[in-house]
Amino acid sequence: MASKKMDLITKVLAIGFAIVSGSIIFMSVVRLVGYDLTMTSCTPSMKPNITCFCPVLIKRYNNNLNPFTSPDYYEIKTDVMNDVKVGDVIHFYDSFGTTILHRVIEYPYSEDGLKEYCVFTKGDYNSENDGCVEYERIIGKLVWKGC
């Protein structure tokens, strides 16, 4: 009887170890190829399109993990200007370093017709926009959601 319990415990631990190891390897590969797999927070700002604790895949532009240091601005600006369109959902840092997932609603243009240094975003459920989100605060763009 004790032997069967030990066998069961060993099998459960082996399966748990395999799941955890596989998840770590999968997340590492996802990160290495320039993406982040994360969960949304539980706020109503993107309802009904993105719900609480929804798994999302982000195409990363900003490889800088610290929101208070300067990444390579020109690299991010080029990526954002070439890839992010009005209507896309982006992942970015707010002025306090908190990550936000909101939709791009407008690119401001300068007098010569060139895109400025930021995008305007807004949560789908929000009545007000977030103001100007500078390119260096943009982490990436939503490419998949699991909800």
Image: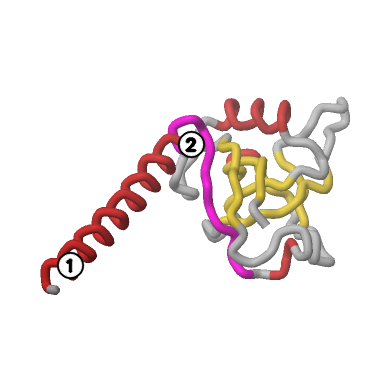
The verdict on residue 50 being magenta is no
> What residue sits 74% from the left and 61% below the top?
46
Q: Position of residue 26 (x, y in %)?
A: 42, 41
> What residue sits 31% from the left and 49% below the top?
18
Instruction: Decide which of 49, 83 is in the foreground and name it.
Output: 49
The verdict on residue 35 being magenta is yes
Instruction: Decide which of 36, 20 is in the foreground and name it.
Output: 20
Measure the C-alpha gap from mark 1 to mark 2.
Answer: 49 Å
What residue did someone put label 2 on? Answer: 63
Give me the disc on residue 4.
Answer: 1
Q: Would you call the spot at circle 2 few (<14 residues within 10 Å), some (14-19), or many (20 or more)?
A: some
Q: Residue furthest left?
A: 2
Q: Earlier in the sequence, mark 1 or mark 2?
A: 1
Q: Residue furthest bottom?
A: 1
Which residues, given as a range, are shown in magenta? 31-42
Give the SS element for disc 1.
helix
The quadrant of the rendering that contains the C terminus is: bottom right
